[in-house]
Structures are given as C-alpha cells and as structure tokens.
Amino acid sequence: MLAASIRSVLAEPRAPDPPPRAWWDWTLVGALLVAAAGEAIFRSDVPARPLATVVAVLVIPALLWRRTHPLLATAVGFGGAMVLHLPMLLGDTDDVMLYAMVSLLLLPYALYRWASGPEALLGTAIVAVPAVVGLATSETAGDVIGGTTVLVASFALGAAMRYRAVARQREVQQVRALERGELARELHDTVAHHVSAIAIQAQAGRAVAATDPASAVEALAVIEAEASRTLYEMRTMVRVLRDGEAADYAPQRGVGDLDELTRMSHVVQVHRGGDLAGLPQPVETAVYRICQESVTNAIRHALHPTAISVEVTGDVDVVRLRVHDDGQAARPATSVGYGVLGMAERARLLGGACQAGPDPLGGWTVEATLPREMAREVRR
C-alpha cells in the first residue's frame, strides 16, 4: 500500500495553467521589502540585523516565482531561513529572523498547489530541515505546537486547493463531453433526414430517367448537395461524439418553438427578426437550447426581474441571439456556471461564440453568434 501511494505521488504531474504573475504579486513583494527595510531600521532588538536584512531582501522576491517554479522558490526561501538559523546553532544568539519572513509560509502552499509529485516530495524535505531546526530551538511547547500547526496548515491548504481545482476541471470536462454528446445526437437526426432525402430523390430520378432526363439531372444535383452536407455532418458527428452514447430520436426544438419559453414565466418576452428561414437543424436547435438555458438561469438566479427579453435576429451570414434580464445580479461576475460552459461549448462546436455576464446597464445578458451555415470542409 505504501509503495503504491509513493508511486502515485511520483506520477503526479504539475498542476496545469498556473496563473501568470500579476500586479498584486509585485505589490505584495514590494510591501514585504518595505516592511523588511523598516524592521532593519527601527528594530534594534534583532540580533545580526545586517544578515537578517540581506537574507530577507534576497529571499522575498522568490515569491514572484512561487507558482511557475515552486520548487526553486521553496529552495531559495527556506535555504535563506536555514542561513538565519546558523547563528543560533553556532552561538548563543536569539532568533535573527525579521517578521517579514513569515511570508515564506506562502511557499509550502504553492509547493503543494502547483508542483509535481517529485517536486513536492523534494520541497517538503527542503522545508523540513530549517523547520525542524527552528522548532528544536523553541523555548516552549506552545511555540512548537503553534509552529507545527501553521506549517502543516500551509501544506494542507495547498493540497486542498489543488484537489478542488482538479475536481472543478473534471466537472467542466464532463459538461463539455455531455454537450458534445447532445450535439452529436442532434447531428445524427439531421444526417438521417438528409439520407432520407437522398433516397427519395434517387427513387424519383430512377422513375423519370427514361422519360424525362432533365428531371433526372435535377434529382442528381439535389442528391449531390444532400450527400455533401451529409458527409460534412457525419464527420462533425464523429468528431464531437464521446463515450459511444446512443442516439436520441426525440424531435429537436428550433427557432419556431421559442414562444414556448413564455410559459416558463410571465416576464419572458420573445422577439424574432430578420431572415430565420432555412437554418440547418443543429443551428436551429442551438438557438433554442441557448435561449432556453439563459431564460432558466434568469428565472433561477436573478433577483426580482420584471422582464426577461429573448431576441433572435437572422442576418445574412449569422444568427444573433440576446437574452437579457433586468433583475439584481445574484450571480458573482467571476463565477462561470456549468450551464454557461455548456452554451459556450455548443456555440464553439458550430463555429460560433457565446458569452454571458453582468450587463453594464444592469441585469445579466447572454449573447451568442452562430454561423448561418455550418462551414464546409474544403474539397481536396
């Protein structure tokens, strides 16, 4: 069991997509350097102030690399802490560490949050050396217990946040996979429709081939067009299908069914404009599904909305939709729900885009743009 656990830790990769260095990182490091300089000037009770100051100035900037290079930052930070323990070990000197060095507790957190398994093990050993020395030289049991608790809490918080991020990523992947499977089922229905049309046209062409060659040629042209669309949509279906899900043959909703959304609440209003005729079935269904999800979210999350407007407009090349509610925003602007992720994934798979968020004029707005015709692959 222990060997399996060690192998599992060693196989753990680095956490993906660490956030880039931001302005608050520079602000934090700058504030800590100013604090360290202030201590060096005004704290006369610190033994070996020149050494403590030099170490703090060299160590604190390592925090800037705690996410992208967690092991290196940890080695620099706790290596500096070990240097400050040397006067205590070699002589009868009290703690020479500045208060600003407490910021090193960010490094164990970052190590377990962002590092790979081997890096985390090595970093833990690096942290343990000065930590054990410092605790061993503590004068009271309370200092030992408190210091151990704080250090372990830093490690534990980093591991917990890593687990939470991994769980979130898996849930997002599940949402995207479900949306892909749903779109694939809808494409299956569309492909079945095209194949039926091809069969009917082939029968008609065969029936009139001997007596009306011109009609037979027209039937062949229709067959060619339907076959081209069918080939593209079959390739799309294969590309987006996941987990071998069975097709669902239930009728798909479309632009003509948007009025049904008004039954969800008396504040829902539907407006259609432009040319919305002749849309491919996947686009029709995507319009309906995005509008339906947006209205559902507005009813569930908006506080006291007096109007939820659904606007769908057909332009020359694209279909635009906008769903807006005037309720008070009960949804945090920084949080992206799984419904929003599903809508964005559906739009992306069809070559469009979808975004949702607080409206500058109040309320919440969902906007999406879908291509009127799904892109065709270039013939080779």
Image (tube, rainbow, N blue to C red):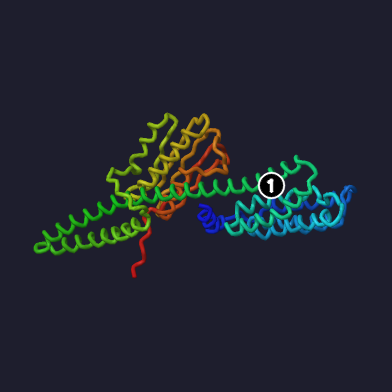
Q: In this picture, is 357 found above or below 21?
A: above
Q: Residue furthest right?
A: 44
> Within 10 Å of the Cα at label 1, are there few (<14), some (14-19), or many (20+) other Cα atoms?
some
Image spot of residue 170 (x, y percent): 48, 49
Q: Residue furthest left?
A: 211
Please name whichever residue, 61 or 137, is drawn nearer the observer in this view of the structure: 137
Please name whichever residue, 147 or 305, is drawn nearer the observer in this view of the structure: 147
> Is 67 on the left or on the right of 90, as rendered?
left
Q: Which residue is mark 1?
A: 151
Amino acid type at image mark 1: Leu
On the rendered image, what quadrant is the C terminus found in? bottom left
Q: In this picture, is 256 found above or below 131?
A: above
Image spot of residue 121 (x, y percent): 61, 56
Image spot of residue 209 (x, y percent): 12, 63
Name the residue at 59% across, 59% down. 118
> Is 244 on the left or on the right of 214, as rendered?
right
Image spot of residue 372 (x, y percent): 38, 53
Q: Secondary structure at mark 1?
A: helix
Q: Is residue 136 visible?
A: yes
> Is 228 on the left or on the right of 354, as rendered?
left
Q: Residue furthest bottom?
A: 380
Q: Total of numbered circles in the picture?
A: 1
Please name whichever residue, 333 or 284, is drawn nearer the observer in this view of the structure: 333
> Is 45 on the left or on the right of 211, as rendered?
right
Q: Is residue 369 visible?
A: no
Name the residue at 43% across, 48% down. 174
Please name whichever residue, 5 or 357, is drawn nearer the observer in this view of the structure: 5
